[in-house]
């Protein structure tokens, strides 16, 4: 139960350990707080934030969440595309002006390392393609910054282990953008979790996750690299390949006359930069499923899956249709399929509870499927009676505000690194099962496949010289 002295948007370290089962080792590192946030007037001090990435998710979500809070100032925006970097600065200025907040003095960078070098920035949001998450987050931790990292946590499982451990060692606050934990105003995900963990469906037997897919398309021809884009740094640890807009992000003009940051970027559909919807939407839904199952720090023991993939040499080559079965502790069977309604259904011996985003939000599902299910639904309306709930989760209507509050309090946020890593790991092992199309056995404690060298080799990837989180981590360990 939430105690009266616990805030709605922040969860104490003790409560976090009790509710999620995070071991002491995961939170044992000292909770370092920027000196400027200390002192008699600390409650009035605002967190100084830098935004790394100024594309679709940054301008439509992360900048909105930070600028919409009264807890932060924004000092800088960085993007490898100079047009997007300048547009991001304008976006933040407009967001602050819209709520009559003091104007922001915002510097613009095309190299995020210059932003990280600033000692006056306390924290950063990282809103980048998946293949860049781990390296940039590791550099941010090394620079002493707290981090809001877009999902999925990392591109590979090996990066996830490395980053989770680096967060614990650094003592920094890291929140992953699994915002269904802070979904408002109806808070249906939190409510669904409370109902399930309070035993409303009886003994949990099955979980069904419905995720969308992205279509493929013929390859577009090679194009000159735009003068406004540092393409080599954009490729990061991935192989050098020719530039075409289809591979990266739109270079056209958006509805506001600036660069197009509304359209879905092409990198979401290329396996060098994203695993597809299995991690795109999957990072959200697996996280909610683990939350409701009370299995946030473990994983499946068996995985079997099938998936359709375009030719690997095609630019848009992420998975198409798929079906995956995972076995969790207690013999709970999870089914993940593009044929299921977009959302999560918890099925027990006394009924089921389904939860999804509101219709207007789920419209971003490219498949455009419709369902008669409500965003919070059940086999019997009585299962959704708010009276008598015995397990309560912390309330939060703003994922970014929860993060900013935790930056100041040094309490653990709602979606910390250990939890985010496990949700992402389940997505990644599902992708590996889709690729290999044979049964796999997973040791959730050791985080390795059992007696399967081929599958274990897919837990990591080579890194191009000069880039890569795993190479960087080895370099840091020698310093």
Image (cartoon, grey):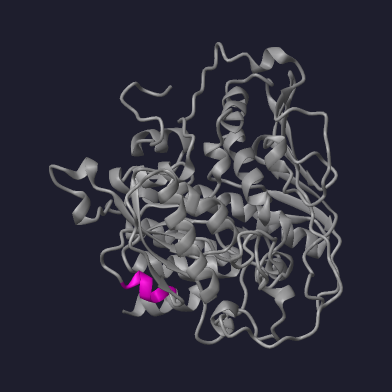
Residue 398 screen position, x and y as percent: 47, 39
Is 285 on the left or on the right of 401, as rendered? right
Instruction: Classify residue 253 by image quadrant.
Output: bottom right
Q: Magenta segment, which residues?
A: 112-117
Residue 426 shows in this picture: yes
Q: Quadrant of residue 183?
A: top right
- The quadrant of the rendering that contains the C terminus is bottom left
Residue 116 part of the magenta segment: yes
| Rendered residue at 50%/53% (across/down) | 62
Q: Main secondary structure of the magenta part?
A: helix
Give the x, y percent position of residue 13: 35, 39
Nearest the viewer among 197 and 34 is 34
> In the figure, is residue 63 to the left or right of 117?
right
Which sits in the foreground, 313 or 458? 313
- Residue closest to the eye, 448 or 38: 38
Residue drawn at point x = 37 percent, y = 71 percent? 115
Query: What residue occupies the far front of the structure in this picture?
Result: 257
Q: Is residue 229 above or below residue 317?
A: below
């Amino acid at each position: 139960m939430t105690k009266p002295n616990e805030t709605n948007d922040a969860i104490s370290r003790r409560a976090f350990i009790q509710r999620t089962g995070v071991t002491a080792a995961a939170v044992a590192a000292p909770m370092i707080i920027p000196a400027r946030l200390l002192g008699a007037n600390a409650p009035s001090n605002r967190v100084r934030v830098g935004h790394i990435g100024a594309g679709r998710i940054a301008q439509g979500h992360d900048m909105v969440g930070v600028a919409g809070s009264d807890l932060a100032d924004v000092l800088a925006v960085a993007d490898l595309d100079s047009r997007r970097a300048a547009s991001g600065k304008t976006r933040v200025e407009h967001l602050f002006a819209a709520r009559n907040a003091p104007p922001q003095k915002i510097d613009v960078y095309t190299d995020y390392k210059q932003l990280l070098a600033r000692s006056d920035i306390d924290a950063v949001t990282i809103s980048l393609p998946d293949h860049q998450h781990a390296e940039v987050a590791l550099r941010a931790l090394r620079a002493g910054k707290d981090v809001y990292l877009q999902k999925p946590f990392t591109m590979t499982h090996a990066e996830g282990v490395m980053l989770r451990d680096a967060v614990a060692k650094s003592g920094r606050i890291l929140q992953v953008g699994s915002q269904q934990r802070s979904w408002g105003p109806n808070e249906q995900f939190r409510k669904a979790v409370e109902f399930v963990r309070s035993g409303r469906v009886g003994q949990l037997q099955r979980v069904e996750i419905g995720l969308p897919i992205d279509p493929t398309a013929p390859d577009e021809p090679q194009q000159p690299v735009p003068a406004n884009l540092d393409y080599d740094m954009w490729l990061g640890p991935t192989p050098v390949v020719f530039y075409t807009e289809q591979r990266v992000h739109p270079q056209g003009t958006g509805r506001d006359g600036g660069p197009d940051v509304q359209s879905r970027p092409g990198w979401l559909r290329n396996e060098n930069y994203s695993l597809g919807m299995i991690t795109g939407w999957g990072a959200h839904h697996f996280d909610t499923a683990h939350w409701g199952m009370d299995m946030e720090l473990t994983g499946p023991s068996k995985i079997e899956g099938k998936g359709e993939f375009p030719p690997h040499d095609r630019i848009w080559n992420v998975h198409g249709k798929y079906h995956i079965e995972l076995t969790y502790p207690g013999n709970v069977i999870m089914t993940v399929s593009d044929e299921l309604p977009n959302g999560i259904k918890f099925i027990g011996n006394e009924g089921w509870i389904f939860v999804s985003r509101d219709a207007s939000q789920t419209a971003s599902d490219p498949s455009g499927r419709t369902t008669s299910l409500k965003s919070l639904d059940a086999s019997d309306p009585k299962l959704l009676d708010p009276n008598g709930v015995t397990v309560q989760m912390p309330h939060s209507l703003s994922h970014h505000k929860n993060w900013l509050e935790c930056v100041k309090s040094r309490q653990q946020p709602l979606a910390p690194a250990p939890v985010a890593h496990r949700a992402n790991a389940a997505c990644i092992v599902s992708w590996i099962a889709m690729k290999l199309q044979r049964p796999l056995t997973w040791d959730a404690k050791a985080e390795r496949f059992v007696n399967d060298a081929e599958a274990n080799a897919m837990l990591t990837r080579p890194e191009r010289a000069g880039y890569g989180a795993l190479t960087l981590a080895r370099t840091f360990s020698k310093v």
